Amino acid sequence: MKLKPFYRRVLYYETDKMGIVHHSNYLRWLEEARLDFLEQVGIPYDKMEENGIMIPVLSSFCQYKYAVRFNETVCIKMHMEEFNGLKFRISYTVTDKNSGEIRLLAETSHFFVDSKLKPIRIKNAAPEIYNIFRDAVGADIYGE
């Protein structure tokens, strides 16, 4: 599995009075990267929801390494750390597109639920999703 990294240009409204990205926006970027991952592997999130499958966030952690400013472009790469068919954990590295400097290290954990928010085992509900997530664990999923 070789995917394109997710690139994100900083918009003006995402910055604060100091001219740097407000910390709350990084979580939105991580979500954008997850949605891009799902799109690239052929399981767009809207199609999952149409089939009654959702992926809420259980936890999130961000370690801010260096400020990101308006109009800079970052590269967000995900790494599937754990997956057991019910829950999964992703780590992220956000780097400056030009210099490669690490700007943020982050992690989120999630689980699969049905439309009634009841936890589900994805292997039973959607084996194709299970296989994609299983194959992504520990793999270098990005080609350059």
Image: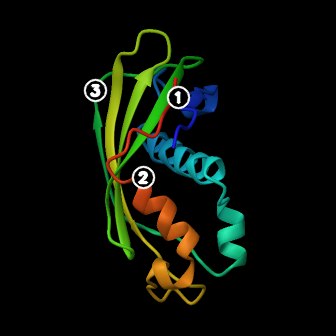
The residue that disc 3 covers is: 65
Using a 10 Å C-alpha cutoff, classify the residue at mark 2 as few (fewer than 14 neighbours), some (14 to 19) or many (20 or more): some
- Residue at 51% across, 29% down: 143
- Are discs 3 and 1 less than 8 Å apart at CB? no
Q: Can you tell which quarter of the image residue 14 is in?
A: top right
The residue that disc 1 covers is: 15
Residue 75 in the image: above or below residue 1 = above
The answer, for residue 1, to whether it is visible in the render is yes
Using a 10 Å C-alpha cutoff, classify the residue at mark 3 as few (fewer than 14 neighbours), some (14 to 19) or many (20 or more): few
Of tags 2 and 3, the one toward the viewer is: 2
Residue 91 % position (x, y): 33, 46
- Three-letter code, disc 1: Thr
The residue that disc 2 covers is: 136
Describe residue 63's horizontal placement relative to residue 98 as left or right: left
- Three-letter code, disc 2: Ala
Of tags 3 and 1, the one toward the viewer is: 3
For the residues labelled 3 and 1, the Cα–Cα distance comes to: 16 Å
Secondary structure under the numbered disc 3 in the rendered image: loop
Looking at the image, is mark 2 or mark 1 earlier in the sequence?
A: 1
Residue 18 % position (x, y): 44, 21
Secondary structure under the numbered disc 1 in the rendered image: loop
Describe residue 133's horizontal placement relative to residue 126 as left or right: left
Looking at the image, is mark 3 or mark 1 earlier in the sequence?
A: 1
Q: Which label was assigned to residue 96? A: none
